[in-house]
Image (cartoon, rainbow, N blue to C red):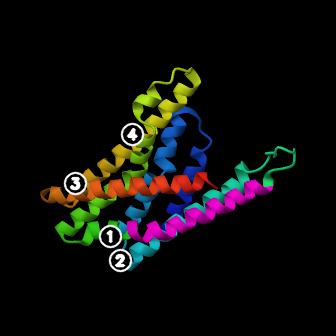
Amino acid sequence: MVATAAVTLGLLAFAADSVAGIVGQLLIALTSSGFAWGLAAVLVGRSAATARRAAVDATMLLMLATLLYYLLVLMVSRRWSGGHLEDGTSADLLGLRSVAIMTAAWLAAAVVAGPMLGMLGYVVRVGKPSTSALAAGGLCGLLSGDGWQALVLAPPWRLLAVTDPDQAQFLRGVLAGQVVKIVLPIVVLVWLATAHRLWRAWPMLLTAAVSCGALSAALWYVLYAAAGSI
């Protein structure tokens, strides 16, 4: 099950990279974002028989999907190759270095995030109502952090103010992707709260969602800043 899910996740994320325009941005939000991969880890953890199995399976899912995705980048799309430096020499080695660094970085992220997301998914299913509410709210915040940090850095009014037709279409897609990455975690929270009858603990749901959302947004900002400096 984990291997099948990882292959599906990696293939969908790779395929989304080749789609342009608004549709491409929506596909990336649905298949190749912190929300999409995080939700996959949560669902694997939620269905696990034990806490240890939840942590291990969620981590393996993210690691296998990451390896497959970057293997496809390396062997199929080869978008790291074909560039040239200012002196005219090939930039392929730099491209390979970038692929290697990003692979290592996302594998490290999988090792950190996988156990946490898997365990939270498991706790939502087996925990006491108060504990499950905290876990469900925390998951909503963690899964939406990517969208919130993007929305703060690029507010909707700024994206919609662009008048160039080509840029405007692309930025509308970016905005649509941001909205998806915020709205869908809320939908997941509503589903979890309804399925596990957690609405009576709504203060815990809300507190956990807001606090974890802020923390997640800050972590995504740091992660993207670090990736941009490579």
Of the two numbered discs 2 and 3 in the rendering, the one whose residue sits closer to the viewer: 3
Which of the two labelled residues, at mark 2 and mark 1, occupies the earlier sequence position?
A: 2
Q: Which residue is mark 1?
A: 122
Q: Is residue 57 magenta?
A: no
Q: Which mark is residue 179?
A: 4
Residue 189 placement (x, y as % from top left): 28, 53
Q: Which residue is mark 2?
A: 51
- Distance in Å between CA atoms under marks 3 and 1: 20 Å
Which of the two labelled residues, at mark 2 and mark 3, occupies the earlier sequence position?
A: 2
Q: Give the amino acid type for the residue marked by disc 4 in the picture.
A: Val
Work out whether residue 58 can be spotted: no
Which of the two labelled residues, at mark 3 and mark 1, occupies the earlier sequence position?
A: 1
Q: Which residue is mark 3?
A: 206
Residue 200 placement (x, y as % from top left): 12, 58
Q: Secondary structure at mark 3?
A: helix
Quarter of the picture containing the C terminus is bottom right
